[in-house]
């Protein structure tokens, strides 16, 4: 639990409930405390929130915390992965469709905006929306109305929009792949979720908790991490953050040959370096790099040693369909 976050601040619907919600954001590092304090400040507002952070940092947990601390906590929380929706179905998915509006639509369907009425609509990976959909989304947010496919009437929608991205949307705006007006509309309030490598105290705690859980699940008696195991954990940049750590510890628990986790039991037994200065023994990149470059390098590294695509997807904390999309996106055979 966090103390000193000001959960009794004006604007919170239920300070006691907010305190319980914030406990789900596990961690005691100063950086995560700052995130919790930010959540408390923005929860009472209806303004759109943009959550920034690398993949696997827990951006959806932050969005759920904003929703749970707000006056909309009793309403629905609808989470949408924008990168997983086929472009041809986006309008129907977001705004709904009337029966017969398109081939195969045998009945009326509600869209995400209608499903989130009175609550919060969380748009994850907002940077992956195509430009045509971006303009329609902007109008829906500004006018608070949507028009279902095949309908002559507009539906009024009452939702609070929270979006998230691992991309630098400012760069996307400059490159013409993201609308500037939509960026400004979504980025009224921003929350940045810190990467795991900047939360070393929390990292050790998470690793111990995961180890305890998986050892109990597998019926294995493992005391903890050896000195070399702890060193490997702390030196690795964890570009996949909590998602990657969880899968790495699960794999290590299965493969461990002794009563402790050694460096060789982890997916990356070789010396590891910070993301900014990673050598060929780390991520295979050096200097300043974008998150996309880091993700691509890490993806190629995991695919290089994982025995199968199924195992690679498990380590990365994604499903196989997402892994196929990422391979296609980065041109990885």
Image (cartoon, helix red, strand yellow):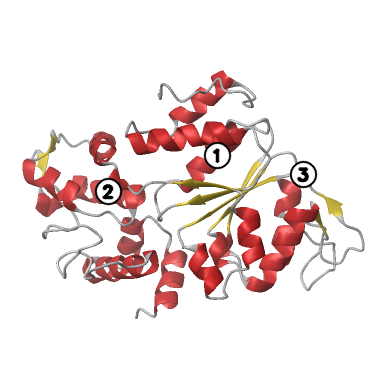
Marks 1/3: CA–CA distance: 17 Å
| Residue 273 on image: x %, y % | 17, 58
Report the disc number at residue 197: 2
Question: Which quadrant holds the N terminus?
Answer: top left
| Along the viewing direction, whichever of 143 and 86 lies nearer the viewer | 143
Residue 147 quadrant: bottom right
Is residue 110 at all visible to an observer of this figure? no
| Along the viewing direction, whichever of 260 and 38 lies nearer the viewer | 38
Of callouts 2 and 3, which one flags the residue occurring earlier in the amino acid sequence? 3
Question: Who's the residue at 87% across and 57% down the image?
Answer: 154
Instruction: Judge from the rendering whether residue 118 lies leftward or rightward of residue 177; answer left or right.
Output: right
| Along the viewing direction, whichever of 241 and 310 lies nearer the viewer | 241
- Disc 1: CA contacts within 10 A as few (<14), some (14-19) or many (>=20): many
Tag 1 secondary structure: helix
Report the disc number at residue 158: 3
Marks 1/2: CA–CA distance: 23 Å
Judge whether 261 appears above or below 275 on screen.
above
| Residue 117 on image: x %, y % | 75, 43
Judge whether 130 appears above or below 241 on screen.
below
Of callouts 1 and 2, which one flags the residue occurring earlier in the amino acid sequence? 1
Question: Who's the residue at 40% across and 76% down the image?
Answer: 330
* Residue ID for mark 1: 64
Judge whether 247 appears above or below 178 on screen.
above
């Amino acid at each position: 639990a966090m103390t000193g976050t000001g959960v009794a601040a004006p604007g919170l619907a239920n300070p006691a409930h907010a305190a319980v919600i914030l406990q789900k954001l596990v961690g005691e590092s100063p950086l995560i405390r700052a995130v919790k304090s930010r959540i408390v400040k923005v929860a009472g507002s209806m303004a759109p929130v943009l959550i920034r952070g690398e993949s696997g940092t827990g951006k959806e947990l932050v969005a759920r915390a904003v929703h749970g601390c707000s006056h909309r906590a009793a309403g629905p929380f609808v989470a949408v992965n924008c990168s997983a929706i086929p472009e041809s179905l986006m309008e129907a998915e977001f705004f709904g469709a009337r029966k017969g509006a398109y081939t195969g639509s045998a009945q009326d369907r509600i869209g995400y905006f209608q499903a989130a009425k009175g609550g919060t609509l969380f748009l994850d990976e907002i940077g992956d929306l195509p430009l045509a959909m971006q303009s329609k989304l902007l109008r829906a947010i500004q006018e608070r109305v949507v028009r279902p496919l095949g309908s002559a009437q507009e539906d009024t929608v009452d939702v609070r929009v929270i979006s998230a991205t691992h991309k630098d949307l400012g760069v996307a705006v400059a490159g013409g792949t993201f609308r500037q007006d939509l960026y400004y509309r979504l980025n009224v309030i921003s929350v940045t979720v810190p990467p795991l490598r900047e939360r070393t105290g929390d990292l050790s705690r998470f690793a111990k908790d995961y180890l305890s859980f998986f050892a109990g699940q597998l019926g294995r008696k493992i005391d903890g991490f050896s000195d070399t195991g702890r060193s490997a954990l702390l030196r690795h940049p964890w570009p996949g953050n909590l998602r990657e750590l969880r899968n790495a510890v699960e794999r290590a628990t299965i493969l461990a040959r002794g009563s402790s986790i050694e460096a060789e039991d982890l997916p990356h037994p070789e010396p590891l370096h910070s993301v900014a200065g990673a050598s060929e023994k780390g991520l295979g990149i050096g200097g300043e790099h974008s998150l996309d470059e880091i993700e691509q390098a890490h993806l190629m590294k995991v695919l290089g040693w994982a025995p199968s695509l199924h195992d690679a997807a498990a380590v990365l904390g994604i499903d196989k369909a997402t892994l196929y999309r990422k391979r296609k996106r980065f041109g990885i055979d």
